[in-house]
Amino acid sequence: MPEKLLTRYIHEPDQADITTYIRRGGYEAARRALRELTPEQIIEMVDQAGLRGRGGAGFPTGRKWRFVPKHAPVKYVVVNADEGEPGTFKDRTLMERDPHQLLEGIILASYAIGAHKAFIYLRGEFYGARRQLQRAIAQATERGFLGRNIFGSDFSLDVVLHTGAGAYIAGEETALLESLEGKRAMPRLKPPYFPAVMGLYSQPTALNNVETLCHVTQIVRHGPEWYKEQGPPVLFSVSGHVARPGLYELPLGIPLRELIFSHAGGIRGGRRFKACFPGGSSSMLLVEEHLDVPMDYESLARVGSMLGSGAVIVMDETTCMVKVIARAVEFYRDESCGKCTPCREGTVWLSQIFDRILQGRGRREDLDLLESIARNMTGTCFCPLGESVPPSLRASLLYFHDEYEAHIRTGRCNVLQPV
Ligand SMILES: Cc1cc2nc3c(=O)[nH]c(=O)nc-3n(C[C@H](O)[C@H](O)[C@H](O)COP(=O)(O)O)c2cc1C
Ligand code: SF4
Protein backbone atom coordinates (compact mmCIF):
# COMPACT_ATOMS: atom_id res chain seq x y z
CA MET A 1 0.00 0.00 0.00
CA PRO A 2 1.46 3.41 -0.96
CA GLU A 3 2.39 5.86 1.77
CA LYS A 4 -0.06 8.47 2.94
CA LEU A 5 1.13 11.93 2.03
CA LEU A 6 -1.58 14.50 2.69
CA THR A 7 -3.18 12.83 5.68
CA ARG A 8 -0.12 11.20 7.23
CA TYR A 9 -0.21 13.31 10.39
CA ILE A 10 -3.87 14.35 10.64
CA HIS A 11 -4.45 12.13 13.66
CA GLU A 12 -1.49 13.58 15.54
CA PRO A 13 -2.89 16.15 18.00
CA ASP A 14 0.01 18.62 17.66
CA GLN A 15 0.44 18.66 13.88
CA ALA A 16 -1.29 22.06 13.58
CA ASP A 17 1.51 23.64 15.62
CA ILE A 18 4.36 25.10 13.60
CA THR A 19 7.10 23.59 15.77
CA THR A 20 5.82 20.08 15.18
CA TYR A 21 5.21 20.76 11.50
CA ILE A 22 8.82 21.93 11.08
CA ARG A 23 10.16 18.96 13.09
CA ARG A 24 8.41 16.64 10.62
CA GLY A 25 10.08 18.31 7.63
CA GLY A 26 7.56 21.08 7.13
CA TYR A 27 8.47 24.30 5.27
CA GLU A 28 11.67 22.67 3.91
CA ALA A 29 10.10 22.43 0.43
CA ALA A 30 9.20 26.13 0.42
CA ARG A 31 12.56 27.19 1.85
CA ARG A 32 14.46 25.13 -0.75
CA ALA A 33 12.18 26.28 -3.58
CA LEU A 34 12.74 29.96 -2.82
CA ARG A 35 16.51 29.49 -2.61
CA GLU A 36 17.22 26.94 -5.32
CA LEU A 37 14.30 26.67 -7.74
CA THR A 38 12.91 29.08 -10.32
CA PRO A 39 9.14 29.63 -10.52
CA GLU A 40 9.19 27.78 -13.85
CA GLN A 41 10.81 24.74 -12.22
CA ILE A 42 7.98 24.53 -9.68
CA ILE A 43 5.36 24.67 -12.42
CA GLU A 44 7.34 22.00 -14.26
CA MET A 45 7.27 19.73 -11.17
CA VAL A 46 3.51 20.18 -10.78
CA ASP A 47 3.09 19.37 -14.49
CA GLN A 48 5.27 16.27 -14.23
CA ALA A 49 3.28 15.05 -11.24
CA GLY A 50 0.15 15.27 -13.40
CA LEU A 51 -1.72 17.16 -10.67
CA ARG A 52 -5.32 17.98 -11.53
CA GLY A 53 -7.45 20.37 -9.46
CA ARG A 54 -9.30 18.72 -6.58
CA GLY A 55 -12.06 21.31 -6.31
CA GLY A 56 -14.28 19.44 -8.74
CA ALA A 57 -13.44 20.33 -12.31
CA GLY A 58 -10.13 18.41 -12.39
CA PHE A 59 -8.29 20.98 -14.52
CA PRO A 60 -4.48 20.43 -14.72
CA THR A 61 -2.94 22.75 -12.12
CA GLY A 62 0.33 23.46 -13.93
CA ARG A 63 -1.50 24.38 -17.11
CA LYS A 64 -3.78 26.72 -15.18
CA TRP A 65 -0.76 28.49 -13.65
CA ARG A 66 0.80 28.90 -17.10
CA PHE A 67 -2.26 30.88 -18.22
CA VAL A 68 -1.34 33.58 -15.67
CA PRO A 69 0.58 36.24 -17.64
CA LYS A 70 4.22 36.26 -16.48
CA HIS A 71 4.81 39.99 -16.59
CA ALA A 72 1.54 41.31 -15.12
CA PRO A 73 2.43 43.79 -12.34
CA VAL A 74 -0.25 42.58 -9.88
CA LYS A 75 -1.28 38.96 -9.49
CA TYR A 76 -3.11 37.03 -6.80
CA VAL A 77 -3.47 33.53 -5.44
CA VAL A 78 -6.95 32.71 -4.16
CA VAL A 79 -7.63 29.53 -2.20
CA ASN A 80 -11.05 28.02 -2.56
CA ALA A 81 -11.79 26.81 0.98
CA ASP A 82 -15.56 27.07 0.64
CA GLU A 83 -16.14 23.29 0.56
CA GLY A 84 -19.89 23.35 0.05
CA GLU A 85 -20.35 20.21 -2.05
CA PRO A 86 -22.68 17.86 -0.15
CA GLY A 87 -20.69 14.88 1.12
CA THR A 88 -17.26 16.57 1.00
CA PHE A 89 -15.22 17.02 4.17
CA LYS A 90 -11.60 16.71 3.05
CA ASP A 91 -10.63 20.41 2.94
CA ARG A 92 -12.04 21.10 6.40
CA THR A 93 -10.05 18.17 7.80
CA LEU A 94 -6.83 19.34 6.12
CA MET A 95 -7.27 22.89 7.44
CA GLU A 96 -8.20 21.86 10.97
CA ARG A 97 -5.52 19.20 11.35
CA ASP A 98 -2.60 20.34 9.19
CA PRO A 99 -3.00 24.04 8.30
CA HIS A 100 0.73 24.62 7.66
CA GLN A 101 0.66 22.06 4.83
CA LEU A 102 -1.82 24.40 3.10
CA LEU A 103 0.19 27.54 3.91
CA GLU A 104 3.30 25.93 2.44
CA GLY A 105 1.34 25.11 -0.74
CA ILE A 106 0.17 28.75 -0.89
CA ILE A 107 3.78 29.98 -0.64
CA LEU A 108 4.83 27.64 -3.47
CA ALA A 109 1.89 28.61 -5.70
CA SER A 110 2.44 32.32 -5.08
CA TYR A 111 6.16 32.05 -5.86
CA ALA A 112 5.38 29.99 -8.99
CA ILE A 113 3.04 32.59 -10.49
CA GLY A 114 4.67 35.69 -8.93
CA ALA A 115 1.90 36.76 -6.54
CA HIS A 116 2.61 38.74 -3.38
CA LYS A 117 -0.86 38.53 -1.92
CA ALA A 118 -2.94 35.42 -1.34
CA PHE A 119 -6.50 35.14 -0.05
CA ILE A 120 -8.11 32.14 1.60
CA TYR A 121 -11.87 32.20 1.02
CA LEU A 122 -13.09 30.05 3.89
CA ARG A 123 -16.58 28.70 4.39
CA GLY A 124 -18.13 30.78 7.17
CA GLU A 125 -19.37 27.81 9.17
CA PHE A 126 -15.87 26.35 9.56
CA TYR A 127 -15.11 27.87 12.96
CA GLY A 128 -12.49 25.24 13.84
CA ALA A 129 -10.63 25.67 10.56
CA ARG A 130 -10.75 29.43 10.96
CA ARG A 131 -9.16 29.25 14.40
CA GLN A 132 -6.41 26.93 13.19
CA LEU A 133 -5.67 29.01 10.08
CA GLN A 134 -5.53 32.25 12.08
CA ARG A 135 -3.04 30.67 14.46
CA ALA A 136 -1.02 29.11 11.63
CA ILE A 137 -0.78 32.43 9.73
CA ALA A 138 0.33 34.22 12.92
CA GLN A 139 2.96 31.55 13.68
CA ALA A 140 4.30 31.52 10.10
CA THR A 141 4.48 35.32 10.05
CA GLU A 142 6.32 35.39 13.36
CA ARG A 143 8.94 32.97 12.01
CA GLY A 144 9.43 35.01 8.84
CA PHE A 145 7.79 32.38 6.59
CA LEU A 146 5.12 34.91 5.57
CA GLY A 147 5.40 38.68 5.22
CA ARG A 148 8.46 40.52 3.88
CA ASN A 149 11.51 38.67 2.48
CA ILE A 150 10.35 35.26 3.52
CA PHE A 151 13.01 32.66 4.41
CA GLY A 152 15.49 35.51 3.97
CA SER A 153 14.81 35.63 0.21
CA ASP A 154 13.71 38.68 -1.78
CA PHE A 155 10.21 37.20 -2.12
CA SER A 156 7.38 38.69 0.01
CA LEU A 157 3.91 37.30 0.57
CA ASP A 158 0.90 38.26 2.69
CA VAL A 159 -1.96 35.84 3.32
CA VAL A 160 -5.43 37.19 4.09
CA LEU A 161 -8.12 34.98 5.60
CA HIS A 162 -11.66 35.83 4.48
CA THR A 163 -14.80 34.04 5.62
CA GLY A 164 -17.83 33.56 3.37
CA ALA A 165 -21.46 33.85 4.36
CA GLY A 166 -22.76 30.38 3.62
CA ALA A 167 -23.76 30.16 -0.05
CA TYR A 168 -22.94 27.02 -2.05
CA ILE A 169 -22.62 29.05 -5.26
CA ALA A 170 -19.79 31.06 -3.66
CA GLY A 171 -17.65 27.93 -4.21
CA GLU A 172 -17.89 28.43 -7.99
CA GLU A 173 -14.67 30.24 -8.78
CA THR A 174 -16.01 33.40 -10.42
CA ALA A 175 -18.86 33.76 -7.91
CA LEU A 176 -16.24 33.39 -5.18
CA LEU A 177 -14.26 36.28 -6.65
CA GLU A 178 -17.41 38.44 -6.77
CA SER A 179 -18.04 37.64 -3.12
CA LEU A 180 -14.41 38.33 -2.17
CA GLU A 181 -14.77 41.73 -3.83
CA GLY A 182 -17.75 42.41 -1.56
CA LYS A 183 -20.51 41.73 -4.08
CA ARG A 184 -23.28 39.17 -4.23
CA ALA A 185 -21.91 35.74 -5.20
CA MET A 186 -23.04 35.28 -8.79
CA PRO A 187 -20.98 33.60 -11.51
CA ARG A 188 -19.20 35.75 -14.11
CA LEU A 189 -19.26 35.17 -17.86
CA LYS A 190 -16.32 33.09 -19.18
CA PRO A 191 -14.84 34.43 -21.43
CA PRO A 192 -13.71 37.10 -20.66
CA TYR A 193 -13.57 36.43 -16.91
CA PHE A 194 -11.24 33.43 -16.76
CA PRO A 195 -9.62 33.97 -13.33
CA ALA A 196 -6.10 33.26 -14.65
CA VAL A 197 -6.27 36.34 -16.85
CA MET A 198 -9.09 38.45 -15.35
CA GLY A 199 -9.67 37.35 -11.80
CA LEU A 200 -9.74 39.17 -8.47
CA TYR A 201 -10.10 42.94 -9.01
CA SER A 202 -9.70 42.08 -12.75
CA GLN A 203 -6.08 41.02 -12.15
CA PRO A 204 -4.59 37.63 -13.11
CA THR A 205 -5.41 35.13 -10.36
CA ALA A 206 -4.46 31.53 -9.70
CA LEU A 207 -7.48 30.07 -7.96
CA ASN A 208 -7.05 26.65 -6.39
CA ASN A 209 -8.73 24.27 -4.03
CA VAL A 210 -7.29 23.53 -0.55
CA GLU A 211 -6.48 19.88 -1.33
CA THR A 212 -4.83 20.87 -4.63
CA LEU A 213 -2.40 23.17 -2.80
CA CYS A 214 -1.62 20.51 -0.19
CA HIS A 215 -0.67 18.21 -3.09
CA VAL A 216 1.69 20.95 -4.33
CA THR A 217 3.49 20.91 -0.96
CA GLN A 218 3.95 17.13 -1.21
CA ILE A 219 5.05 17.24 -4.87
CA VAL A 220 7.79 19.79 -4.18
CA ARG A 221 8.80 18.07 -0.93
CA HIS A 222 9.16 14.56 -2.39
CA GLY A 223 9.62 15.20 -6.11
CA PRO A 224 7.05 14.44 -8.82
CA GLU A 225 8.32 10.91 -9.59
CA TRP A 226 7.98 9.57 -6.05
CA TYR A 227 4.66 11.39 -5.66
CA LYS A 228 3.31 9.68 -8.79
CA GLU A 229 4.47 6.29 -7.53
CA GLN A 230 2.20 6.78 -4.51
CA GLY A 231 -0.89 6.61 -6.69
CA PRO A 232 -1.00 9.54 -7.27
CA PRO A 233 -2.96 9.99 -4.05
CA VAL A 234 -6.48 11.36 -3.85
CA LEU A 235 -8.70 12.10 -0.86
CA PHE A 236 -12.10 10.42 -0.78
CA SER A 237 -14.75 11.59 1.70
CA VAL A 238 -16.88 8.49 2.17
CA SER A 239 -20.27 8.91 3.86
CA GLY A 240 -23.70 7.33 3.99
CA HIS A 241 -24.59 3.70 4.64
CA VAL A 242 -21.09 2.26 4.97
CA ALA A 243 -19.71 0.55 8.05
CA ARG A 244 -16.71 2.91 8.33
CA PRO A 245 -17.46 6.38 6.94
CA GLY A 246 -14.46 8.71 6.87
CA LEU A 247 -11.65 10.31 4.94
CA TYR A 248 -9.55 7.92 2.83
CA GLU A 249 -6.31 8.76 1.06
CA LEU A 250 -5.99 6.21 -1.73
CA PRO A 251 -4.46 5.95 -5.20
CA LEU A 252 -6.33 7.57 -8.06
CA GLY A 253 -8.13 4.87 -10.04
CA ILE A 254 -8.99 2.56 -7.15
CA PRO A 255 -12.15 0.61 -8.11
CA LEU A 256 -15.31 1.90 -6.47
CA ARG A 257 -15.99 -1.61 -5.13
CA GLU A 258 -12.63 -1.74 -3.34
CA LEU A 259 -13.12 1.71 -1.86
CA ILE A 260 -16.54 0.85 -0.44
CA PHE A 261 -16.10 -2.80 0.50
CA SER A 262 -12.42 -3.07 1.49
CA HIS A 263 -11.66 0.35 2.91
CA ALA A 264 -15.02 1.71 4.13
CA GLY A 265 -16.05 -1.66 5.58
CA GLY A 266 -18.88 -2.44 3.14
CA ILE A 267 -22.54 -1.68 3.62
CA ARG A 268 -23.57 -1.36 7.24
CA GLY A 269 -25.68 -4.11 8.77
CA GLY A 270 -24.82 -6.50 5.92
CA ARG A 271 -27.38 -4.86 3.63
CA ARG A 272 -27.09 -4.58 -0.15
CA PHE A 273 -25.55 -1.67 -2.01
CA LYS A 274 -28.11 0.28 -4.00
CA ALA A 275 -26.54 3.44 -5.42
CA CYS A 276 -23.95 6.14 -4.78
CA PHE A 277 -22.84 9.58 -5.81
CA PRO A 278 -19.12 9.10 -6.63
CA GLY A 279 -18.08 12.76 -6.53
CA GLY A 280 -20.58 14.71 -4.44
CA SER A 281 -24.25 15.27 -5.16
CA SER A 282 -23.31 17.08 -8.39
CA SER A 283 -21.90 13.89 -9.92
CA MET A 284 -24.24 11.50 -11.69
CA LEU A 285 -25.65 8.69 -9.59
CA LEU A 286 -24.03 5.25 -10.04
CA VAL A 287 -25.65 1.86 -9.43
CA GLU A 288 -24.53 -1.74 -8.84
CA GLU A 289 -23.44 -2.27 -12.44
CA HIS A 290 -20.86 0.52 -11.99
CA LEU A 291 -19.15 -0.93 -8.91
CA ASP A 292 -16.04 -1.96 -10.84
CA VAL A 293 -15.45 1.45 -12.37
CA PRO A 294 -12.01 2.87 -11.50
CA MET A 295 -12.27 6.10 -9.52
CA ASP A 296 -10.39 8.30 -11.96
CA TYR A 297 -11.33 11.24 -14.16
CA GLU A 298 -11.57 9.39 -17.49
CA SER A 299 -13.30 6.20 -16.31
CA LEU A 300 -16.01 8.09 -14.42
CA ALA A 301 -16.54 10.44 -17.38
CA ARG A 302 -16.98 7.38 -19.62
CA VAL A 303 -19.96 6.22 -17.54
CA GLY A 304 -21.42 9.74 -17.57
CA SER A 305 -20.36 10.76 -14.07
CA MET A 306 -17.30 12.49 -12.59
CA LEU A 307 -14.69 12.25 -9.85
CA GLY A 308 -15.61 15.79 -8.71
CA SER A 309 -14.36 16.44 -5.20
CA GLY A 310 -14.15 12.73 -4.34
CA ALA A 311 -17.21 12.70 -2.06
CA VAL A 312 -18.64 9.18 -2.22
CA ILE A 313 -22.17 9.13 -0.75
CA VAL A 314 -23.32 5.52 -0.43
CA MET A 315 -26.94 4.35 -0.20
CA ASP A 316 -28.19 0.89 0.74
CA GLU A 317 -31.26 -1.06 -0.34
CA THR A 318 -33.52 0.65 2.22
CA THR A 319 -33.12 4.03 0.50
CA CYS A 320 -36.01 5.58 -1.40
CA MET A 321 -34.40 7.00 -4.54
CA VAL A 322 -37.35 9.31 -5.21
CA LYS A 323 -36.70 10.96 -1.84
CA VAL A 324 -32.95 11.15 -2.52
CA ILE A 325 -33.39 13.00 -5.81
CA ALA A 326 -36.17 15.17 -4.33
CA ARG A 327 -33.77 16.21 -1.54
CA ALA A 328 -30.98 16.95 -4.01
CA VAL A 329 -33.31 19.04 -6.18
CA GLU A 330 -34.45 20.94 -3.09
CA PHE A 331 -30.80 21.71 -2.26
CA TYR A 332 -30.07 23.07 -5.75
CA ARG A 333 -33.34 25.04 -5.73
CA ASP A 334 -32.36 26.73 -2.45
CA GLU A 335 -28.76 27.33 -3.56
CA SER A 336 -29.55 28.57 -7.10
CA CYS A 337 -28.34 32.17 -7.33
CA GLY A 338 -31.26 33.07 -9.60
CA LYS A 339 -29.17 34.60 -12.38
CA CYS A 340 -30.44 32.37 -15.20
CA THR A 341 -33.96 31.13 -15.96
CA PRO A 342 -33.44 27.38 -16.58
CA CYS A 343 -31.84 26.87 -13.17
CA ARG A 344 -33.93 29.37 -11.20
CA GLU A 345 -37.29 28.19 -12.58
CA GLY A 346 -36.38 24.61 -13.46
CA THR A 347 -35.34 23.67 -9.94
CA VAL A 348 -38.56 25.18 -8.52
CA TRP A 349 -40.75 23.28 -11.00
CA LEU A 350 -38.91 20.02 -10.34
CA SER A 351 -39.29 20.54 -6.63
CA GLN A 352 -43.02 21.14 -6.92
CA ILE A 353 -43.45 17.92 -8.90
CA PHE A 354 -41.42 15.94 -6.36
CA ASP A 355 -43.52 17.39 -3.52
CA ARG A 356 -46.65 16.26 -5.33
CA ILE A 357 -45.32 12.74 -5.86
CA LEU A 358 -44.07 12.37 -2.29
CA GLN A 359 -47.36 13.65 -0.85
CA GLY A 360 -49.26 10.95 -2.72
CA ARG A 361 -50.74 13.25 -5.37
CA GLY A 362 -48.42 12.24 -8.23
CA ARG A 363 -49.79 11.85 -11.77
CA ARG A 364 -48.60 9.44 -14.47
CA GLU A 365 -47.63 12.35 -16.73
CA ASP A 366 -45.35 13.77 -13.99
CA LEU A 367 -42.58 11.39 -15.01
CA ASP A 368 -42.59 12.75 -18.59
CA LEU A 369 -42.66 16.25 -17.15
CA LEU A 370 -39.59 15.55 -14.96
CA GLU A 371 -37.77 14.16 -18.01
CA SER A 372 -38.74 17.13 -20.16
CA ILE A 373 -37.62 19.74 -17.59
CA ALA A 374 -34.32 17.87 -17.11
CA ARG A 375 -33.81 17.88 -20.90
CA ASN A 376 -34.53 21.59 -21.13
CA MET A 377 -32.09 22.43 -18.32
CA THR A 378 -29.28 20.48 -20.00
CA GLY A 379 -26.79 22.77 -21.72
CA THR A 380 -28.86 25.88 -21.04
CA CYS A 381 -27.74 26.89 -17.55
CA PHE A 382 -25.24 29.71 -17.06
CA CYS A 383 -22.98 27.72 -14.72
CA PRO A 384 -22.43 24.10 -13.62
CA LEU A 385 -24.75 24.40 -10.59
CA GLY A 386 -27.89 24.14 -12.70
CA GLU A 387 -26.25 21.62 -15.03
CA SER A 388 -25.61 19.22 -12.17
CA VAL A 389 -29.33 18.59 -11.54
CA PRO A 390 -30.40 16.72 -14.72
CA PRO A 391 -27.86 13.83 -14.88
CA SER A 392 -28.80 12.22 -11.55
CA LEU A 393 -32.48 12.91 -12.05
CA ARG A 394 -32.41 11.19 -15.43
CA ALA A 395 -30.32 8.30 -14.05
CA SER A 396 -32.88 7.79 -11.27
CA LEU A 397 -35.72 7.78 -13.81
CA LEU A 398 -33.80 5.16 -15.78
CA TYR A 399 -32.64 2.84 -12.98
CA PHE A 400 -35.44 3.32 -10.46
CA HIS A 401 -38.47 3.91 -12.67
CA ASP A 402 -40.44 1.31 -10.73
CA GLU A 403 -39.99 3.29 -7.50
CA TYR A 404 -41.44 6.43 -9.10
CA GLU A 405 -44.32 4.40 -10.56
CA ALA A 406 -45.05 2.76 -7.22
CA HIS A 407 -45.15 6.16 -5.49
CA ILE A 408 -47.62 7.46 -8.07
CA ARG A 409 -49.73 4.28 -8.13
CA THR A 410 -50.00 3.68 -4.38
CA GLY A 411 -49.45 7.21 -3.05
CA ARG A 412 -46.69 6.07 -0.68
CA CYS A 413 -43.16 4.74 -0.50
CA ASN A 414 -42.83 1.03 -1.23
CA VAL A 415 -39.13 0.64 -0.55
CA LEU A 416 -38.24 -1.80 2.19
CA GLN A 417 -37.65 0.30 5.30
CA PRO A 418 -35.00 -0.62 7.89
CA VAL A 419 -36.26 -2.64 10.84
C1 LIG B 1 -21.62 25.36 -7.78
C2 LIG B 1 -20.15 25.10 -7.62
C3 LIG B 1 -19.60 25.00 -6.35
C4 LIG B 1 -18.24 24.78 -6.20
N1 LIG B 1 -17.75 24.66 -4.93
C5 LIG B 1 -16.42 24.48 -4.76
C6 LIG B 1 -15.87 24.42 -3.45
O1 LIG B 1 -16.57 24.50 -2.45
N2 LIG B 1 -14.52 24.24 -3.34
C7 LIG B 1 -13.70 24.17 -4.44
O2 LIG B 1 -12.50 24.05 -4.29
N3 LIG B 1 -14.21 24.20 -5.68
C8 LIG B 1 -15.53 24.38 -5.87
N4 LIG B 1 -16.03 24.47 -7.14
C9 LIG B 1 -15.07 24.38 -8.28
C10 LIG B 1 -14.44 25.77 -8.53
O3 LIG B 1 -15.27 26.49 -9.41
C11 LIG B 1 -13.05 25.66 -9.17
O4 LIG B 1 -13.12 24.81 -10.28
C12 LIG B 1 -11.99 25.14 -8.23
O5 LIG B 1 -11.99 25.80 -6.98
C13 LIG B 1 -10.63 25.35 -8.88
O6 LIG B 1 -9.60 24.82 -8.08
P1 LIG B 1 -8.79 23.53 -8.52
O7 LIG B 1 -8.34 23.74 -9.95
O8 LIG B 1 -7.65 23.48 -7.59
O9 LIG B 1 -9.72 22.37 -8.40
C14 LIG B 1 -17.40 24.66 -7.33
C15 LIG B 1 -17.97 24.76 -8.61
C16 LIG B 1 -19.32 24.96 -8.76
C17 LIG B 1 -19.87 25.07 -10.13
S1 SF4 C 1 -27.07 27.89 -13.20
FE1 SF4 C 1 -28.10 28.49 -11.28
S2 SF4 C 1 -26.47 29.04 -9.90
FE2 SF4 C 1 -25.60 29.06 -11.99
S3 SF4 C 1 -25.89 31.16 -12.71
FE3 SF4 C 1 -27.70 30.06 -13.32
S4 SF4 C 1 -29.13 30.46 -11.63
FE4 SF4 C 1 -27.10 30.96 -10.86
Image: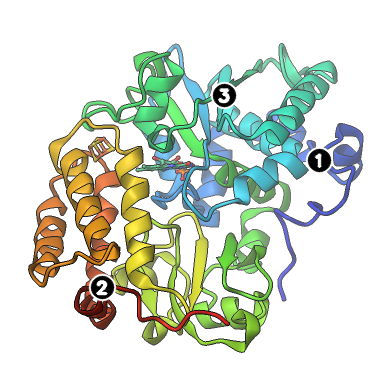
- Neighbor class of circle 1 (other Cα within 10 Å; few <14, some 14-19, many 20+) is some
Badge 2: how crowded within 10 Å, few (<14), some, or many (20+)? some
For label 3, the SS is strand
How far apart marks 1 and 2 lie (CA) works out to 60 Å
Q: Could you tell me which residue is drawn at 58 percent across and 64 percent down?
A: 239
Disc with the residue nearer the chain's start (1 vs 2): 1
User: Are circles 2 and 3 on residues that touch, CB within 8 Å?
Assistant: no
Q: Is mark 1 within 8 Å of ligand 1?
A: no
Please name the residue shown 48% across and 71% down the image: 295
* Label placed on residue 26: 1
Query: In front: 231, or 226?
Result: 231
- Percent across and percent down for residue 106 are 62, 32
**What amino acid is at disc 3?**
Thr
**Residue type at mark 1?**
Gly
Residue 384 pos. (x, y %): 28, 46
Q: In this view, does 403 lie to the left or right of 279?
A: left
Q: Which of marks 1 and 2 is in front?
A: 2
Q: The residue under label 2 is which amino acid type?
A: Gly
Q: Which of 103 and 122 is in front in this view?
A: 122
- Asked whether the viewer can see residue 207, the reply is yes
- Marks 3 and 1, Cα distance to the nearest angstrom? 26 Å
Residue 147 vs residue 92, the one in the foreground = 92
Q: Earlier in the sequence, mark 3 or mark 1?
A: 1
Secondary structure under tag 2 reads loop
Q: Residue 305's quadrant in the figure?
A: bottom left
Q: Where is residue 77 in the image (x, y as percent from the top left)?
A: 52, 26
Residue labelled 2 has its Cβ within 8 Å of some atom of ligand 2: no
C-alpha distance separating marks 2 and 3? 45 Å
Disc sitting over residue 411 in the figure: 2
Asked whether disc 3 touches disc 1, contact meaning CB atoms under 8 Å apart, the reply is no
The residue that mark 3 highlights is: 163
